[in-house]
Amino acid sequence: MWPLTALLLLATLEKPILSLHPPWTTIFKGERVTLKCDGYHPLLLELQPISTLWYLGHLLLPSHKKSIEVQTPGVYRCQTRGAPVSDPIHLSVSNDWLILQVPYAPVFEGEPLVLRCRGWYDKVVYKLHYYHDGQAVRYFHSSANYTVLQARASDSGRYQCSGTMRIPVESAPMFSAKVAVTVQELFRAPVLRVMGPREARGAALGGVVLRCDTRLHPQKRDTPLQFAFYKYSRAVRRFDWGAEYTVPEPEVEELESYWCEAATATRSVRKRSPWLQLPGPGSPLDPASTTAPAPWAAALAPGNRPLSFRKPPVSRSVPSVTSVRNTTSTGLQFPASGAPTAGPPACAPPTPLEQSAGALKPDVDLLLREMQLLKGLLSLVVLELKEPQALRELRGTPETPTSHFAVSPGTPETTPVES
């Protein structure tokens, strides 16, 4: 029983946390900093008086205390007995007049990022500039820290500072070495998905349950997140702790108009999902893969196009349209009369591309033609308001057709277009 308990404790131990004081990874030559190793020290595993191990690179240091003072550059790690090795801290030592100090701990999205430009042994730096990827981002008259209150991924990059010092007279501008800074992603961009019948146990009868899925960084897995759901640009549920939302049965035919948003409680980090992508063929939610499809199965159509919620299209005849030159705008078109045309074009058999577009394409084609006719009529109104003389000359030209619908041979009357 005793060996089994010891093995269980070894399996559940987490690696210790290594911290640096002061929290800067670059120091001047001759300075000392303190490293502290915080870990779990079970009495069961303290079979020997040694409790903490220290490593500089692959070299085992002689100290076994919980904290040590160092001044040698390199990569430091620590380990408590029986636990894994801690994350590393890279310490740099500089002999320059000016150094840029960055924090040792990783900076996550939404957290403050603090940079410190420091002169040799704390001499005051004047005419201080901070640079991000070669671009000046902040100026101070004298020594001051540069702080980004809520860091973003775009704040990652290479930073540098420059300034002058009085040694004893004011020196020429001096530059620090460039330091790389990476802002860690707090959580991934969410993905909205449809939950299966077994997952959605609390779903309302006849509705569809959507879930906003994301993943936190392992070091921030205890960070609470809130979720909001949207239909087009309208919020159907504002930020709440629940990651699921039930779509009412009358709205299941518009599932592809939904998206979600995940955020921290303070809204310092907010990320939205893409539009909902419905399951493809063969998935558990595919209508063809079930013998008794749910009432909302018709909404799970393949493809990425938005589902249509308009009435079925009605077949109509559309008159032919010809273009007329216009002095105020090129490319405008409006109906013309004159020599009779061959009549309205016959309906061609649908191509495979048109069949894949479904019922939405006829409505779109008809709407485009109606907009084209309206555009031509509006161009005449604009021309008459701006240049009435030019419009009268245009109407008086025998080659210019007037705005009437073309009539095919043998057709007693024109066919109006219904809007």
Image (cartoon, rainbow, N blue to C red):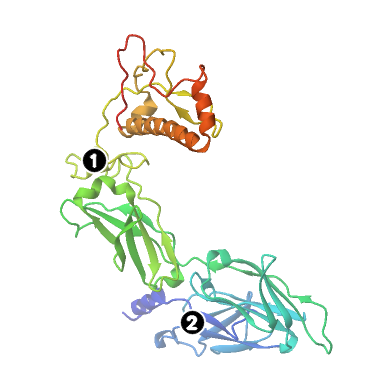
In primary-sequence order, the first of circles 2 and 1 is 2
Occupied quadrant, residue 132: bottom right
Q: Amino acid at mark 1?
A: Ala
Instruction: Report whether residue 199 is seen.
Output: no
Q: Nearer the viewer, residue 332 or 70?
A: 332
Q: Nearer the viewer, residue 372 or 135?
A: 372
Q: Residue at x 30, y 57 (%)?
A: 211
Q: What x and y, as percent, mark residue 138?
A: 65, 74
Q: Is residue 280 above or below residue 134?
A: above
Marks 2 and 1, Cα distance to the nearest angstrom? Answer: 60 Å
Occupied quadrant, residue 136: bottom right
Q: Residue at x 37, y 23 (%)?
A: 351
Tag in front: 2 or 1: 1
Mark 2, residue position: 81
Residue at the farthest right position: 169
Q: Amino acid at mark 2?
A: Arg
Mark 1, residue position: 298
Query: Is residue 263 toward the left or the right of residue 21 in the image?
Result: left
